[in-house]
Image (tube, rainbow, N blue to C red):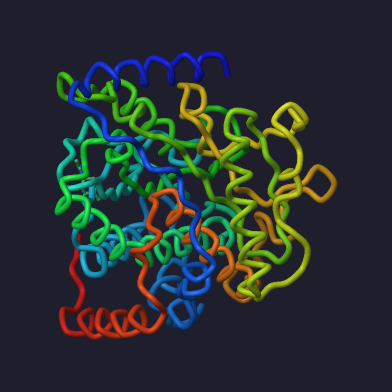
């Protein structure tokens, strides 16, 4: 915590030094309005587990280094190239021997997609970073991992698609008004679909988190161009929001980290407002039981090992959205063959995608730029038609 605080202070200091022109008075942080929350699109048939455009292609075994893994990676690439063509796509690759690979190096491919304000150079953008792992577990054979983490990947895809036009509009309007010289205006967004989260044998420090360990190390050592506001791609992560084991009914999300409890509370607030507006179809009790606590009252013994650890250890601020409670543990289907499409609670999965959309829209300050539902629906039809016309592109 101490380290992260110093890091932030240094960053602010360097921002102040780097931005030498006059700062415009920053507008007050604006919550997303009820009207906007009410107009957020649900993923609907795109999340059909049999033939939905977003979710169904991920519901296959996708063990690192197998054809299923490549198929899912191709699905991500196709989605971003077709539906979000202004996003920048990258891969970060590594190889590693695993306990079951008989000395063979297995490839791990992290998928990275990002979108920055058009005027900002790469090293000057702090990015809200939404993360899920896309690999599935080696055992039991044929394991699908619908909550772990196919559904979280699809939730993030839906959320990014739902805010993309608003980002374009907001940035165009800022550019037109020449209003892009405040610090707020170096805010970007990024998606990480990580490979090799699961252990092949028993979870150890070396048999788990293959992709995230490699990416965190790589981004810690890579240096942004000289004079950048952020020294490394790692320090460009403003908040690392990790989604894992989501899609079972009535999840419990604990707040793990005092330094990001404010971000947890903001998420809880969007949840509460969506419920108040009857936008939550899954009903049930609230998902964020720690929201009324302050940051000194959080449990400190409940940390769950996951893809955030290699980042957390290097000072990255993390919000861990994982369905876990000390009394109930993980969802019932956890690491069982039943963690498949049929066992997802689809109302919950859709509610999660609304929540992530609303949260991202609020973080990116998109109030006033989000389309109303009707406009959104017709643009989705259009992009589906476009997809059909253009066919698939391969890696
Ligand atoms: C990483 O792996 C992907 C998928 O195999 C491949 O398309 C890409 O070219 C590789 N990238 C680099 C930088 O080697």
The quadrant the N terminus occupies is: top right
Residue occupying the point 62% across, 38% down: 202
Q: Is residue 105 visible?
A: no
Where does residue 335 sit, x and y in percent of width and height?
Answer: 65, 55
Q: Nearer the viewer, residue 271 or 61?
A: 271
**Considering only vertical position in the picture, is 294 above or below 359?**
above
Q: Residue placed farthest to the front in the image?
A: 25
Where does residue 294 sit, x and y in percent of width and height?
Answer: 73, 33
- With 86 as the anchor, is 371 left or right in this view? right
Q: How many labels sit on residues?
A: 0
Residue occupying the point 69% across, 30% down: 295
Q: Nearer the viewer, residue 32 or 61?
A: 32
- With 69 as the anchor, is 176 left or right in this view? left
Where does residue 213 sit, x and y in percent of width and height?
Answer: 43, 31
Q: Quadrant of residue 94?
A: top left
The quadrant the C terminus occupies is: bottom left
Q: Quadrant of residue 285?
A: bottom right
Q: Nearer the viewer, residue 154 or 56?
A: 154
Where does residue 334 sit, x and y in percent of width and height?
Answer: 68, 56
Residue occupying the point 37% across, 63% down: 368
**Considering only vertical position in the picture, is 8 above or below 288?**
above
Q: Is residue 166 visible?
A: yes
């Amino acid at each position: 915590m101490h380290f992260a605080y110093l890091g932030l202070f240094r960053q602010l200091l360097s921002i102040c030094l780097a931005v030498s022109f006059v700062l415009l008075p920053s507008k007050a942080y604006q919550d997303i309005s009820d009207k906007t929350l009410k107009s957020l699109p649900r993923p609907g048939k795109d999340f059909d587990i049999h033939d939905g455009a977003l979710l169904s292609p991920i519901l296959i075994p996708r063990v690192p280094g197998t054809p299923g893994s490549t198929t899912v990676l191709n699905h991500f690439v196709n989605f971003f190239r077709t539906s979000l063509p202004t996003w920048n796509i990258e891969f970060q690759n590594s190889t590693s021997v695993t306990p079951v690979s008989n000395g063979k190096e297995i490839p791990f491919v992290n998928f990275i997609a990002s979108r920055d304000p058009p005027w900002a150079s790469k090293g000057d953008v702090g990015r809200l970073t939404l993360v899920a792992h896309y690999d599935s577990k080696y055992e039991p054979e044929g394991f699908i991992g619908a909550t772990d983490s196919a559904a979280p990947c699809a939730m993030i895809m839906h959320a990014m698609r739902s805010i993309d036009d608003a980002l374009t509009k907001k940035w165009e309007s800022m550019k037109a008004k020449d209003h892009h010289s405040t610090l707020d205006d170096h805010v970007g967004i990024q998606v990480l679909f990580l490979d090799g989260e699961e252990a092949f044998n028993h979870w150890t420090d070396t048999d788990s988190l293959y992709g995230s360990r490699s990416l965190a190390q790589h981004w810690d050592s890579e240096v942004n161009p000289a004079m950048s506001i952020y020294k490394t791609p790692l320090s460009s992560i403003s908040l690392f929001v990790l989604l894992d084991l989501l899609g079972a009914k009535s999840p419990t999300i604990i707040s793990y980290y005092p330094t990001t409890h404010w971000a947890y509370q903001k998420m809880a607030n969007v949840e509460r407002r969506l419920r108040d507006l009857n936008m939550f179809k899954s009903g049930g009790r609230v998902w964020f039981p720690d929201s009324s606590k302050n940051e000194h009252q959080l449990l400190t013994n409940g940390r769950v090992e996951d893809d955030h650890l290699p980042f957390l250890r290097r000072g990255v601020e993390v919000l861990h959205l994982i369905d876990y409670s000390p009394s109930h543990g993980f969802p019932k289907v956890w690491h069982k063959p039943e963690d498949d499409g049929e066992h997802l609670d689809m109302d919950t999965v859709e509610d999660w995608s609304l929540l992530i959309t609303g949260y991202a829209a609020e973080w990116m300050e998109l109030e006033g730029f989000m389309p109303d539902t009707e406009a959104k629906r017709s643009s989705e039809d259009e992009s589906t038609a476009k997809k059909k016309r253009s066919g698939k592109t391969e890696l």
